[in-house]
Image: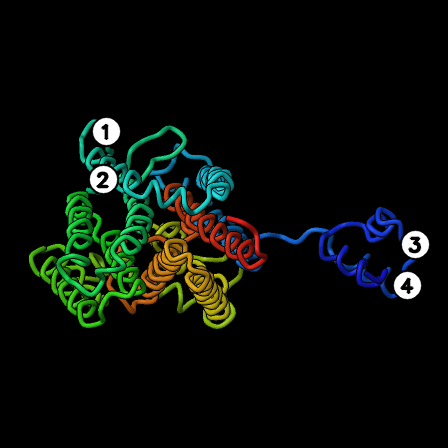
Amino acid sequence: MTPRLRAALARLLGRDPHALLAADGLPVRLSSRSARSAQTLPRRQFGFDQPLFWVVLALLGWGLVMVYSATIALPDNPRFAHFAHTHFVLRHGMAIGIGCAAAWLVFQFPMRAWQQLAGWLFAGALLLLVLVLVPFIGIEVNGARRWIPLGLMNFQPAELAKLAVLIYAADYMVRKMEVKEHFFRAVLPMAAAVGVVGLLLLAQPDMGAFMVIAVIAMGILFLGGVNARMFFLIALVVVAAFALMIFLSDWRRERIFAYLDPWSAEHVLGKGYQLTHALIAFGRGEIFGVGLGGSVEKLHWLPEAHTDFLLAVIGEEFGLLGVLLLIGLFLWLTRRIMHIGRQAIALDQVFAGLAAQGVGLWLGFQAFINIGVNLGALPTKGLTLPFMSYGGSAILLNLIAIAIVLRVDYENRELMRGARK
């Protein structure tokens, strides 16, 4: 082997070319061109998707800044008078720290371990969804019982249920791959499992989380190869079920009517109040925004400005350009995650690929709903903006989901390098 070829091999292996040549008894002198190349190439390459990592980090940082901007004036309200001005941003930062630590731990687990634990994870999520309904375990906020107090944060089992259904559905499709054309053997059992989760979520009530879980399960079934006719039949049944739930619920019907005419005298100070003030915030932002910290709507006009309606504050302070940038980031993020999933399936890692694509469906659909609600394109629904809105459980599970995607990408790269499983 020539010295030049040996130097190239050394660079690929991340070792010092001089040391590798000397170890083989060859002259250690390299050409100036080879030496410069050896110095400029990195000794070690990252084993996961760096652009995806940095986009998530950018969303987390932007969200932290916006949560501080949206909550800095909350202690002026008598309802939050006992909180410091930095209370919410510090708790949000703590949630990000806990989420990053959890994501690092999750990244260490191979995807085959997640597949083996799929059933147990689903059962654990069901148990927590039952426990949160128990009065002395779950806490009630604004008429909804969705949280279990854990000291550092109030944990929301619905967020864990999204991940649990995702993992369970991916494993389910792998096990049912041979009978995926048969409705009663392939689709009906999964539909029953999602139905049980949905009943527990509606008892809280949390229809938004149920919608996300239904989309995740349906999407994984479709991506797993379920017959298209059966898929559209399932979609029709799900849409009909949600329409029936809205029709049978007075307060849900009122929310739909308020969405259709939020500026009417009947709704502007009632069910349409959040939407009208969100639209006012976007109107004030115009093209370039009023500047970071300059929002007026966050000063006790727009309810839940730091959670469900954080995008309205972004629109007011950063304008149309800021909103378009945010939408672009989520579009790129979703597309990149789906690409990683397709790559895993092409490498015959079907479970890992479906799990990654399930994460893409989860984050993409939830961001789509939140953005649509803030812009008045969709009826008001209590879903947070992934990675950005205030909320410990959502941040924790979003980061865990991204860690799973990065693990899938890491294993894809190992397989493409020819590494042994």
- Dot 1: few (<14), some (14–19), or many (≥20) neighbours within 10 Å? few
- Residue nearer the viewer, 13 or 6: 6
Q: Secondary structure at mark 3?
A: loop
- Tell me the CA gap for discs 2 and 3: 66 Å
Q: Which residue is mark 1?
A: 137
- Tell me the CA gap for discs 3 and 4: 11 Å
Residue at image point 16% right, 57% down: 185
- Tell me the CA gap for discs 1 and 4: 71 Å
Residue at image point 16% right, 52% down: 189
| Amino acid at circle 3 | Pro
Q: Nearer the viewer, mark 1 or mark 4?
A: 4
Q: Would you say the residues marked 4 and 2 are in contact, meaning their CB atoms lie under 8 Å apart?
A: no
Q: Which residue is mark 4?
A: 31
Q: Secondary structure at mark 2?
A: helix
Report whether residue 162 is seen.
Answer: yes
- Residue nearer the viewer, 62 or 355: 355
Report whether residue 316 is seen.
Answer: no
- Residue nearer the viewer, 239 or 89: 239
